[in-house]
Image: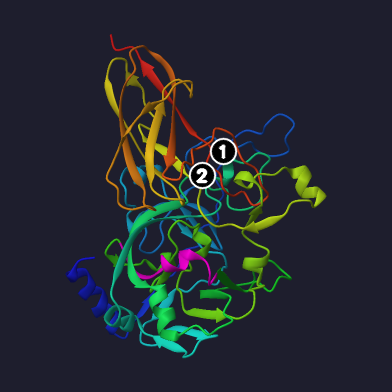
Amino acid sequence: MSRRSALRLLGAAGASFGFSATLRSATTPPQESTMPPALPGSTGPGPNPYWNSVGMYVNEPQKAPLLLLTDRPVQLETPRHYFATAFTPNDAFYVRWHLDGIPNAIDLKNWRLRIDGNVTKALSFSLPDLMRKFPAQTVAAVNQCSGNSRSRFQPRVPGGQWGNGAMGNAKWTGVRLSTLLSAAGMKSGSLQVQFQGLDTGMGPEGYGSKAFLKSLAVTNPVLEDCLIAYAMNGEPLPLLNGFPVRLVVPGYFATYWMKCLTWIRVLDKQDENFWVKTAYRIPDTPRGATTPKEVKAGTVKTVPIHRMPVRSFLISPDGGSKIPAGMDVILRGIAFSGYGRVNELEVSDNDGKTWLPAQLGEDFGAYSFRTWEFRWTAKKPGRYFISVRATDKTGNIQPDEPVWNPGGYLWNRIERQEITVGVAE
């Protein structure tokens, strides 16, 4: 974050102003003809065959046109072409809220980040306090919705039917969470740190879910990596992405990345709220995989979702046009993992029968997107199926098998892109 950007942000924070935005309602469903066909014997549509979700583009404040999933709560998906570089533009960054009562105005004169609970001293910080009183830290990290690619699941599961665009990568600047917790002084007997933002709403009926709350154990090493971010790619966060500050949990799914973070509580007992005890849980099995039969039988033990599995994507070419035979083409894409930096990317042009190494781009950190390139020449006309797979530093390799669980989480199957090569003579 440049000094000029920091001063601009600080100047805005020091002023008494209300940030206001009216979130437009758009409820027209996608045309039926654009939906994937039903599978034989299925009562609903099959897996989404497209890279993105199936929906219309909408304009929201501070945002480029994004794909609409729902308007209450707001869910917007990033189109494929924005992933051609390592960092996702702020105005194209996907949006996912859990409750419909999201803030559309923040008065920084009154807003405070409060830390209380099982601490020696309760604290309260304004945005200028966070920027002036503590060293600024920056980390590049991927923010990915737990349900990214849910539309690939078969049988289909409830929830937002995301394509692959419920993710983004940014340089996040802010204060270390551990610094603020040290200032407050956690007392003995502390078990969890709970986070709460400003969104409220009905939530699932009967579960006491009217506020969105998430917790991390005080013994979890990820707390040392967490930031309270007030800047995103060197600029203030868009309101829809959590202005004025949000929690950044590198390597973890976005359910922990609390937007409009306003309360941090140190708990001396286990958090039993709906969003921890019931929601965002995965089968305690390899890859979080189970079957509808096991779920129905009630035999599936679950654990909270946490780190993101290794993934990779071909971004261009996108298969939208033919490529002349004999032409050199640069295949380009991204890869990432919640378990550490990607150190190998392989490409196949024969549907995974053989693999060749790609050239990895700049390393921006263990939890950042990493770009890759591969020079490819199709010597003969025909249909080619390009596959890509990544390996991270801990040895996790993308699998070529689907996964299924009732939450629609943890999809990371090898992606395939059909490319048509035409006659060049």
**Can you name the residue that lies furthest to the bottom here?**
121
Residue 189 appears at what percent x and percent y? 59, 81
- Is 165 located above or below residue 132 in the figure? above
Q: Residue 163 carries which label?
A: 2
**Can you name the residue that lies furthest to the front here?**
188
Front one among 160 and 252:
252
Kindly tell me whether residue 377 is visible in this rendering. Answer: yes
Specify the amino acid type for callout 2: Gly
- Identify the residue position indicated by label 1 in the image: 48
The stretch drawn in magenta includes residue 228:
yes
Q: Is residue 381 left or right of residue 75?
A: left
Q: Is mark 1 on a helix, strand or loop?
A: loop
Measured in 3D between alpha carbons, the distance from the residue under mark 2 to the one under mark 1, in whole angstroms, is 7 Å
Where does the N terminus fall, quadrant-wise?
A: bottom left
Residue 310 appears at what percent x and percent y? 47, 44
Q: In this view, does 199 lie to the left or right of 277?
A: left
Residue drawn at the location 72% of the way across and 42% of the way down? 291
- The region drawn magenta spans 217-232
Specify the amino acid type for callout 1: Asn
Residue drawn at the location 77% of the way across and 45% of the way down? 294
